Amino acid sequence: MFDIENFDLKLNTEIIGRNFIYIEEIDSTNTFLLDRQNKIEISGTVVLAEKQTKGRGRKDRVWYSTKEQNLTFSILLLKDYRLFNHLNLINFSASLAVANSIENLYQLKTELKWPNDVLINKKKTCGILLESSSLGNKIDRVVVGIGVNVNQSMFQGQFNYPPTSIRIELGREVEREKLLAEILNNLEFYLSKIPTETDYITREWKERCRMIGEKIYVKEGELIKNGIFDDIDNEGFLLLRTKDGIEKITIGDVSIV
Ligand code: BTN
C-alpha cells in the first residue's frame, strides 16, 4: 500500500504532484489524464495507479507492471506553451529525473537510451510515454506517463528490451514513496530549465547516453537504418551519420550493432 502522507512529506515541489490522485485500479493513467471528460484541469496533477489494466507503452505496445510493486504514474501539464514547443525535451527531462533519482537514492549507475528509456546494467528499468492533445491546432494538454520497475522481482513474457527493476539490481526492496517524491522534485527542476536553457537538458542527457559515437541501427516499423549515433540536436532528435550524410531521426528504437 502506498503511503500518501509519507510521500507528501518528501515532496518539495511547487506545482508537480501538489494535486495528487491515488487510484487502486485504472485502465491507464495516461488515458485518464488525456480524457477531458474526467475534468482534471490542474496543471501538475499526478495520477498514480497501483494497477493498470491497459497500461500503454510507446508504439502501441503494452506496459506490464505487477500490482503494488512499481510506480506507474502520469503527470498533467496544461497550457504551458513555453514547454510545449519542446516536447522532446520534456521527454528528456523525465528520463533525467528518473535516472538522477535512482543514482542519488541507491547509487546505481544508470544509462539513457534514446529517446527516453532508463537502463541499469543495459536493462530497462523505466519507460516514458509522452502524449498530447490539442484545442484547434494548438497543443494545450501534455501527459507524461512514467513506468518505473521498482520492486518487481521477476519478469515473464516477451519484451522489446530486457527488463529489470531497482530491486533486482540493488538486491533489496526500496521505498516507493521516497522514490516518487524524488522523481517529481527532480522533474520540476529540469522542466524549469527548458524555456531558457534548452542546452542544459541536452548536455545532461548526452552525458548519460553511452551510445553516442557507436554504430547503431534504428528500427521504425519495418524500416531499419544503419549508421553512427553522431549526436543529439538542440531539440533532442537523434542525428544518424550514414554514408549519405547526417539524417535526423525523430522516432524509432535504437540498438547497438
Ligand atoms: C515505453 O517504454 O514504451 C513507455 C512505457 C510507459 C508506461 C507508463 S506507466 C504510466 C503511464 N500510463 C500508461 O498507460 N503508460 C505510461
Image (tube, rainbow, N blue to C red):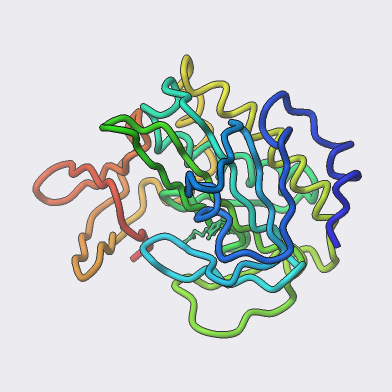
The residue sitting at 61% across, 32% down in the picture is 42
Above or below, 75 against 89 in this view is below
Closer to the camera in the image, 237 or 143: 143
Closer to the camera in the image, 240 or 31: 31
Q: Is residue 153 left or right of residue 146?
A: right
Q: Position of residue 90 (x, y in %)?
A: 48, 36
Above or below, 230 against 171 in this view is above
The residue most toward the top is 196
Q: Position of residue 10 (x, y in %)?
A: 85, 37
The residue sitting at 44% across, 73% down in the picture is 160
Q: Position of residue 109 (x, y in %)?
A: 67, 51
Quadrant in which the C terminus appears: bottom left
Quadrant in which the N terminus appears: bottom right
The residue sitting at 68% across, 66% down in the picture is 25
The residue most toward the left is 244
Quarter-wise, where is residue 169 in the image? bottom right
The residue sitting at 25% across, 62% down in the picture is 220
Q: Is residue 193 left or right of residue 225?
A: right
Q: Position of residue 31 (x, y in %)?
A: 50, 55
